[in-house]
Amino acid sequence: MARLNYVELPTADIDAAARFYEQVFGWTMTRFGPTYAATMSGDTDVGLQADQTEATKAPLAVIEVDDLEAALTAIEQAGGTVVRSIFAFPGGRRFQFTDPSGNELACVKGD
C-alpha cells in the first residue's frame, strides 16, 4: 500500500510559519528542535522545515510505503532519480527522489 501521509513545507521563519498555521487552521505544531515543527494528527500531517540546508525549494509530498527499498528500486526503474539516499529520522526512514517531470517527493517507512 502507498498513500500520501505527509507534506513538508520549506520556511525561512519557523516561528512565523507555526503561528500562521496554528492561527488559521487551529493546528498544534509540535517542535522538534529549533528548525522543525509538525502536526501529529496521525492522518496526513504537515511539517515545517526551516533548516535551509535540508529544506526543499517547494512543498515536499511524502508517500508512505510498505517496503522502502522496493519503492526505491521501482522509482529508479521507472525513470525517477534518487536525490537523497535512505536516511533515518525519529520515527522511521525515508529517501527523496525526483519524478521524470522534476518534482521532488519522498518515500517513507515508519518504525
Image: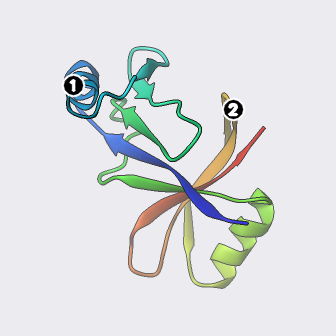
Above or below — where is 95 with respect to 1? above
Image location (x, y in percent) of residue 51: 37, 29
Image location (x, y in percent) of residue 10: 31, 41
Split into 4 quadrants, where in the image is the N terminus?
bottom right
| Residue 85 visible | no
Image location (x, y in percent) of residue 36: 42, 25
User: Which element carries disc 2, helix, strand or loop?
Assistant: loop
The residue that disc 2 covers is 91
Query: In which image quadrant can residue 18 be found?
Result: top left
Q: Residue at x 30, y 52 (%)?
A: 57
Above or below — where is 41 with respect to 23? below
Image location (x, y in percent) of residue 34: 39, 15
Name the foreground residue: 30 vs 43: 43
Residue 9 is left or right of residue 70, and the answer is left
- Discs 1/2, front: 1
| Residue 99 visible | yes
Marks 1 and 2 in Cβ contact (< 8 Å): no
Q: Residue at x 26, y 35 (%)?
A: 11
Residue 18 is left or right of residue 81, and the answer is left
The residue that disc 1 covers is 23
User: Which element carries disc 1, helix, strand or loop?
Assistant: helix
Q: Residue at x 26, y 31 (%)?
A: 21
Identify which amino acid the numbered label 1 is placed on: Gln
Residue 63 is left or right of residue 45, and the answer is right
